[in-house]
Image: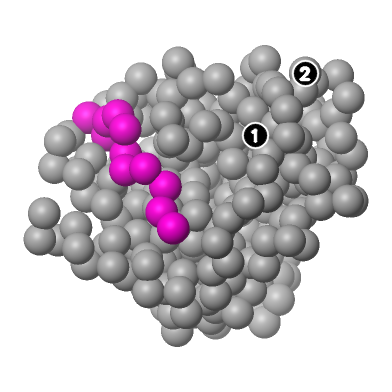
Amino acid sequence: MTTPSQPRPVLQDPEANHEFSQQGVVTRPFFSPEQVAELRGELDQLGTFGGSGFYDTAAAALESAQREAIHRILCSAFAQAASELLVDYEPVMSSFIVKGHGQDSQKEIHRDFRLLDESQFRAVCIWVPLVDVDEINGALAVIRGSHQVDTGPRSVPMTPRYSQDPLLELSFEDAETVPVSAGEAVVFDMALAHGSDVNHSNLPRYAAAVAYAPKSAPLSLYFCDTDDSVEELAVPHPDVFRQIDWRVRPNYLRSLGMISSDRPPTSSAEFLQQSRAISQGSATD
């Protein structure tokens, strides 16, 4: 089962937008070496982040002032290039990611939670490494075409148990590594299955990411309760995503109703088969 095709343009360049619509991911030049160094310097001034394992400021226990400072720095740094790349989008969330050395530096194959009505709009992540990345130090790995495969609600703080998550059985052998240079952006649909394997190098892997949504798109939080019910909650402003506790239903948000649990089951094999059919079929459109 697939979601509707891209309903409106995301990227300003028509050829890149076509590739993005069908593949769910493109790479594009984004920062100059000077801009990479400047961004690293600004982030270093805020303190030391990470260590061993996988560290993401979006999920870390930070003071709100520090979290907002990181968001301001990243949104400011991304603003010019993002405005030239995307069609009328605005930043929603951001993160500074440090992948240390060792087995616990792996980030499993996953899909980001849903922010909006994906039958009408698409949310986008611009992920930019601040060092060269490849298979050795944990470049992003993606499953092309997977953004159009429906496996049920992508909710917080968990996936409903009635929706067997086919991604749990996937490995990095099922995904394609995307090596890029420092400052080169990997632009992907937030419904795309992605992750990053172990950092086998002796140096930290630094990356910055900003999630964007169309300015005209109503935003929502899809919250899964302990009884596996998923409720759509209206998000009046992007700042809400950085302020809420994902583990607790934010009762101050207006309910837009419950999300139906009806959908065909999808195994990991079916998920890969459908994703590859979408990706390979697009090449002959």
Write down the residue under mark 1.
70
Instruction: Tell me what residue is drawn at x 45 percent, y 84 percent.
Output: 173
Q: Earlier in the sequence, mark 2 or mark 1?
A: 1
- Residue type marked 1: Ile
Does the magenta-highlighted stretch encompass residue 97? no
Instruction: Tell me what residue is drawn at x 55 percent, y 61 percent.
Output: 264
Task: Specify the principal SS of the magenta part.
Answer: loop
- Which structural element holds mark 1? helix
* Left or right side of 214 for 8: left
The correct choice, above or below, for 264 with respect to 212 in the image is below
- The x, y position of residue 39, in whole percent, is 49, 39
Circle 2 packing at 10 Å, graded few (<14), some (14-19), many (20+), is: few
- The x, y position of residue 23, in whole percent, is 29, 56
Residue 35 appears in which quarter of the rendering? top left
- The x, y position of residue 217, in whole percent, is 49, 21
Give the magenta range.
1-12
Instruction: Tell me what residue is drawn at x 49 percent, y 46 percent.
Output: 190
The correct choice, above or below, for 172 with respect to 156 in the image is below
| Marks 2, 1: nearer the viewer | 2
Residue 140 appears in which quarter of the rendering? bottom left
Name the residue at the left extreme.
Answer: 284
Residue 254 marker = 2
So how many labels did they put on this image? 2
Residue 7 appears in which quarter of the rendering? top left
Q: Is residue 112 visible?
A: yes
